[in-house]
């Protein structure tokens, strides 16, 4: 793992955006695995800015998102479909046919998982962007998820519902869906390279476990210690519990 400590959120976002830009420039038809959450918002903003300046071209880029909530329509502003369009896709020249986000039909979750996984089996992700949950989840792979897992549906943990409630109407936990579809840990590990970003004190335990803890399904992000090309970019608060110097 390469670990970079960023000065602050803006610095973390710029560093990660630089790596993603380099990927797009070196391979214009690259496959990007993309993440949602509040952490990558600044990074996407930076990519849009560079696109508008003429420095980036998304016309041949393919994207594959990690996950989606069950029960939210695409026009619901809390859905990950909406998030990705609002923060990135609507502002760049990406071809909508190249965009992949899990479709969640309320009654056929198994079929939805199979469809997404069949699509994943046909491509190799060049660069997978990740955030991390306060409990160490990646995508929506909650503690206890098998490292061999492929796209699957998930009962979200109470801690995740609590954490993510801040992004819902008035922080209302009842508004947060209780299930989601997520790429599995094996799908993530199959990516050629991984960039994980984390910021804020509420990520310090998860970051410590991911980098210095044992590799265990109890802290899903720790599996990244077994990946050969991982770059972690964290701010000072998220890095606070690390014992070694990086
Ligand atoms: C959700 C997403 C994850 C994301 C996590 C952290 O649970 N499924 O992909 O990493 O939230 O979100 P935030 O960046 O808002 O802390």
Image (spheres, helix red, strand yellow):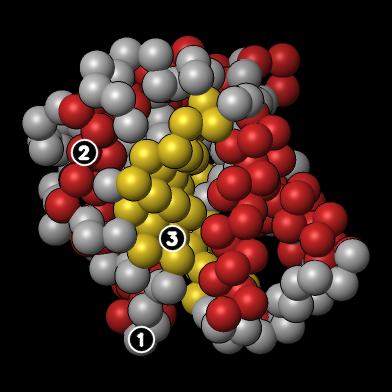
| Residue 42 % position (x, y) | 70, 40
Q: For residue 90, which quarter of the picture?
A: bottom right
Q: Which of 152 and 222 is in front in this view?
A: 222
The label on residue 128 is 3
Q: Residues within 10 Å of mark 2 (few under 14, many from 20)?
A: many
Q: In this view, does 149 lie above or below 15?
A: below
- Which of the marked residues, 3 or 2, is nearer the chain's N terminus? 3
Disc 2 on helix, strand or loop? Answer: helix
Residue at figure coordinates x 25%, y 33% from the top left: 211
Q: How many labels does the image show?
A: 3
Residue at figure coordinates x 19%, y 28% from the top left: 212
Left or right: residue 88 versus residue 132 is right
| Residue on which the image places disc 2 | 222
Q: Which of 231 and 109 is in front in this view?
A: 231
| Residue 142 % position (x, y) | 29, 36
Left or right: residue 73 versus residue 55 is left
Residue 153 is at least partly visible in this image: no
C-alpha separation, residue under disc 2 versus residue under disc 1: 26 Å
C-alpha separation, residue under disc 3 versus residue under disc 2: 16 Å
- Would the CB of label 2 be found within 8 Å of ligand 1? no
Left or right: residue 231 versus residue 200 is left
- Which of the marked residues, 2 or 1, is nearer the chain's N terminus? 1
| Residue 140 % position (x, y) | 38, 43
Nearer the observer: mark 1 or 3; the answer is 3
Q: In the displayed orientation, state which residue is furthest to the right.
A: 53
- Which of the marked residues, 1 or 3, is nearer the chain's N terminus? 1
Disc 3 on helix, strand or loop? Answer: strand
Q: Residues within 10 Å of mark 1 (few under 14, many from 20)?
A: few
| Residue on which the image places disc 1 | 122
């Amino acid at each position: 793992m390469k670990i970079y400590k960023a000065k602050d959120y803006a610095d973390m976002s710029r560093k990660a955006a630089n790596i993603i830009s380099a990927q797009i420039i070196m391979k214009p038809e690259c496959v990007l695995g993309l993440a949602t959450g509040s952490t990558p918002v600044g990074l996407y903003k930076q990519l849009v800015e560079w696109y508008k300046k003429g420095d980036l071209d998304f016309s041949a880029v393919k994207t594959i998102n990690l996950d989606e909530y069950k029960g939210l329509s695409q026009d619901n502003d809390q859905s990950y479909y909406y998030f990705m369009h609002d923060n990135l896709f609507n502002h760049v020249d990406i071809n909508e046919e190249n965009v992949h986000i899990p479709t969640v039909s309320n009654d056929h979750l198994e079929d939805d998982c199979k469809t997404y996984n069949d699509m994943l089996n046909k491509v190799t992700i060049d660069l997978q962007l990740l955030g991390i949950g306060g409990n160490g989840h990646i995508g929506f792979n909650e503690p206890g998820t098998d490292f061999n897992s492929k796209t699957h549906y998930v009962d979200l943990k109470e801690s995740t519902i609590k954490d993510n409630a801040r992004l819902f109407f008035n922080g209302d936990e009842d508004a947060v869906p209780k299930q989601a579809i997520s790429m599995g840990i094996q799908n993530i590990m199959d990516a050629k390279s991984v960039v994980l970003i984390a910021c804020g004190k509420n990520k310090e335990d998860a970051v410590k476990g991911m980098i210095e803890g044992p590799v265990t399904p109890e802290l899903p992000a720790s599996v990244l210690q077994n990946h050969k090309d991982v770059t972690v970019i964290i701010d000072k608060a998220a890095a606070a519990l690390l014992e070694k110097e990086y």
